Image (spheres, rainbow, N blue to C red):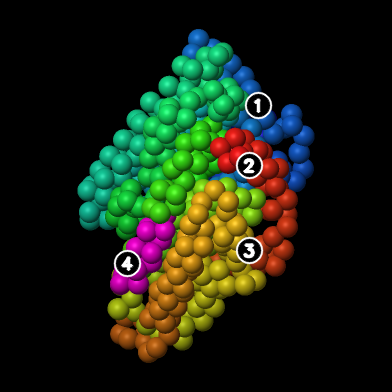
Amino acid sequence: MIPVLLIVIPLVSGLVGFLIRNEKTARSWSLFAAVVTLFVSLSGLILHKEDAFLSADVAWLPAMGSRFSVALDGMGQVLCLLTAISFPIIFIATWRTPYKNARNFYALMLLSQAGLMGVFLAMDALLFYFFWELALIPVYFLCSIWGGEKRIAASFKFFVYTFLGSIVMLVGILWLYSHTPDHSFSLKSFYALRDKVTGHDQLWLFWLFFIAFAIKMPIFPLHTWQPDAYEQSPTATTMVLSAVMVKMGLLGLLRWLAPVLPLGTWAWGDTVSMFCIIGMIYASLVAMQQDDLKRLVAYSSIAHMGLMCLAVFATTQLGMQGVMIQLFNHGINILGLWIVVELIERQFHTRKMSELGGLAQKAPVLAILLVVVALANVALPLTNAFIGEFLMFSGVYASAVTRYNVVFTVTAGISIILSAVYTLNMIQKVFFGNTNTLTEKAKDLYPNEKFVLIVIVVLIVLIGVYPKPVLDLTKETVDTLLTKMATATK
């Protein structure tokens, strides 16, 4: 019941949103729908923990062996909660941002939320692919219609990358479907193939899935669409892309690739890990050279996602647990950074750090909240990202499936040092120093903006001090994943 509601509420609300004519009504309707979705997500997490409430399985396309099968496991709970929290925060934070044809903008945002929920909940491969596309299509239109001056080129690159990735993944899904004994798209049927698909077949099938997931995260060298898309998209859409949508790729690895093709995952683990390491160092170095706030945060996200992907291929209990909690933490932290970027751009009509300075004198509350979020982004102890990155580094170092675990750990650690360099440099240039003619009349936060940043800071500190509930929530999922991947590591 709850998984169905998490999909249906934003889906129906988005379709209704197209019919609303008044801009204020459209904005209020979208926020209302997002808050209701958040309430449903919390009820599945706190109140209704029975299996009957957390799963649904009904006939969908019986002739093709596909069912509408959705369920909330530990990873699904974390990602659906992140999605449910993110959209109200985004709508509140951008409440004062005007949009042309606002009803269409907010309706497409809700449709993207429905698609994301479906991806995180789907237990049927064809249903997973359906929602994968549903989540991407609204984002394409959001970027191409409401984006910046170069939005068409950025949207086209985004479309080409994601479309090609989706096609090769579909080929892999159909190949696996054709080899299931019961000709079913169900996740259980796919898991049953893991010992039956030959090692040779797993080697090439691995790339059909990994390319699609790597594009979404994104992982070097399939990352080039991301900085342009993030820069040109309206910031509200960039928040969705960066905080939530990149998690589609990681979920794909954890649910649909590693457990289904464990031999392929093991065989190509070092190769993928090298791509992750290269991407982390490259993205960090490029971020250090950026003057545009959006591009800096975009490259920062590439580096952090690379570490999470690296920890997946380490195949350790600690690494996997770190990835699970970081799925949520990264989304919250990067969302806070994007909100600050949105507030600065809306007030000063620029994102260039060289044109800013001294904001802490005029907007002290914004400065304090930004510093907390930024320190979480570099995994300072007692912030939420610390426990996730500590577990991931521990997992990579303890990995028994690679001979290069020490090299990977040390090199990944360098990227963390670099992240501190460009993050602190950003704080210095934007918030400290002397004011100029542009920032002299800066205003501090409005109540709605202060509210969402305080919520984010509370989550950062709360999870940083007491991460146990999130770790307990995902422990069973981690154990199941490692058991299914054990075939390749023995």
Q: Which residue is mark 1?
A: 56
Dot 2 or dot 4: first in sequence order is 4
Q: Which residue is mark 2?
A: 482
Q: Residues within 10 Å of mark 2 (few under 14, many from 20)?
A: some
SS at mark 2 in the image: helix
Is residue 277 inside the magenta stretch?
yes
Residue 253 versus residue 270 in the image, above or below: above
Dot 1 or dot 2: first in sequence order is 1
Give coordinates of residue 50: x percent, y percent.
Answer: 77, 34
Q: Amino acid at mark 2?
A: Leu
Q: Nearer the viewer, mark 3 or mark 1?
A: 3
Q: Residues within 10 Å of mark 4 (few under 14, many from 20)?
A: some
Q: Quick check: marks 1 and 2 in contact, CB under 8 Å?
A: no
Give coordinates of residue 383: x percent, y percent.
Answer: 61, 69
Q: Give the numbered dot on residue 387.
A: 3
Give coordinates of residue 41: x percent, y percent.
Answer: 65, 43
Image point 75% across, 46% down: which residue? 46
Image point 49% across, 67% down: which residue? 410
Dot 2 or dot 3: first in sequence order is 3
Q: Which residue is mark 4?
A: 286
Residue 187 versus residue 85 in the image, above or below: above
Image point 33% across, 75% down: which residue? 353
SS at mark 1 in the image: strand
Q: Amino acid at mark 1?
A: Ala
